[in-house]
Image (cartoon, coloured by chain):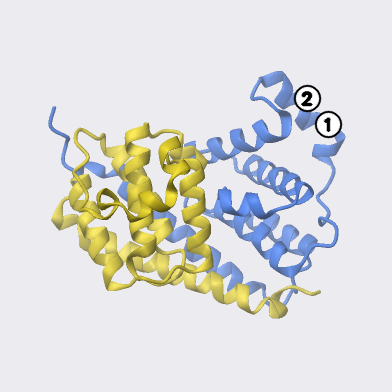
Chain colours: A yellow, B blue
Amino acid sequence: MRRQIISRLDQEQRNWLFKAIGRIIMADKKVDINEQAELFDALSLIADEHQIADAKRVLASADFLAKFTPMQHIPRDKAWDIFSELIRTAVSDAELAQEELDLLNQIMDALGFKKEARAALFSWVEKMVNLRSEELAFARRLDLYIER
Amino acid sequence: MRIEVLRMLSEEQRGWLYRAVAKLVLIDERLDNTEQNEFNEVMQALAGSLDMMDVQDLMRSESFSRPLTAPREITPERAWALFVELVRTAVVDARLATAEKAYLNNIMDCLGFAELGREPIFQWIELMAKAHSIENGFAVRLNQIIPQPKA
């Protein structure tokens, strides 16, 4: 998670991003170690005091699990910042399950993304998944790359 | 830089990464906004402020200008984490200048990377730069992706 992106968002946008990150992480029903770190960061960096104090209840609340409400009047650049941050979360486990794709589509609806732009966006997301997969593969074979 | 990475580093490793990122950003002759933000973030951490005098004092200091040496007793996993964070900064402007590539090679020497395994790593870095180029392309054509919000 990038501090400079978060610092540009207001609290409403941060709360929205926090919900989206939580939903993306839980979408495929597996939370790996990278995703746990993302969720922890999201909580400490963007959630409001109420959410931090009662994180468990917030994550299980009806509001958290409800469909995304459209972000009214959000400037394009902020919508893009939120989306690009979410993509980084979605690809952190180097997999993109169908549930995550469906959720990203819902999120794009709520952020007002055009339908016709989505194929190109998903093609880029696919590249990001592959690159993350390659990065994790290097990390699993460090004995080949770094001398102890 | 990613907060989850910064959090797992020791103070020494974090200081090393800040210095390495600052030096990397300074190599690039064309600073874009994201690189400028990265530079500000590390300068804030190293100099304690973004005041021009403080930043200049820091950049002239012996501790900043001496060549980077590996942090003490660094594990391969931690060396990789530091390297990946530097790669992410290097490709954020969607290109990898020759000087940046040479710098990353020096960093690999410093962190104990084997000579033999570098080619696939650099291929991956080039692809990372391309992916950033696509992302930056979307960001400059947002009117084609997101209609103007209604007033």
Q: Chain of mark 2?
A: B
Q: From the top left corner, tell me how far across and down residue B109 is, in percent.
A: 78, 64
Which label belongs to residue B21? Answer: none
Q: Position of residue A36 (x, y in %)?
A: 50, 61
Q: CA distance from mark 2 to mark 1?
A: 6 Å
Q: Chain of mark 1?
A: B
Q: Secondary structure at mark 2?
A: helix
Front-lying residue, A59 or B9 = A59
**In the image, is residue B119 above or below residue B49?**
below
Give the residue at x 76% y 31%: B59
Q: Position of residue A66 (x, y in %)?
A: 22, 53
Which amino acid type corresponds to the residue marked 1 in the rendered image?
Ser
In the picture of the structure, the residue carrying the numbered disc 2 is B57
* Camera-nearest residue between A25 and B81: A25
- Which disc number belongs to residue B61? 1
Left or right of residue B139: residue A72: left
Which of the image's four quarters has the C terminus of chain A? bottom right
Mark 2 nearby-residue class (10 Å; few <14, some 14–19, many ≥20): few
Q: Residue A124 sits in which quadrant?
A: bottom left
Q: Residue at 37% across / 39% down in the picture?
A: A14
* Residue drawn at the location 69% of the way across and 43% of the way down: B18
Say whether marks 2 and 1 touch (CB < 8 Å).
yes
Looking at the rendered structure, the secondary structure element under dot 1 is loop
Under mark 2, the amino acid is: Asp
Residue A53 seen in this snapshot: yes
Q: Nearer the viewer, residue A122 or B90?
A: A122
User: Do badges 2 and 1 share one subunit?
Assistant: yes
Q: As drawn, is A98 to the left or to the right of A56?
A: left
- The answer to whether residue B99 shows anywhere in this view is no
Q: Is residue A138 above or below residue A50?
A: below
- Specify the quadrant of the image occupied by residue B107: bottom right
Disc 1 crowd rating (10 Å Cα; few below 14, some 14-19, many 20+) is few
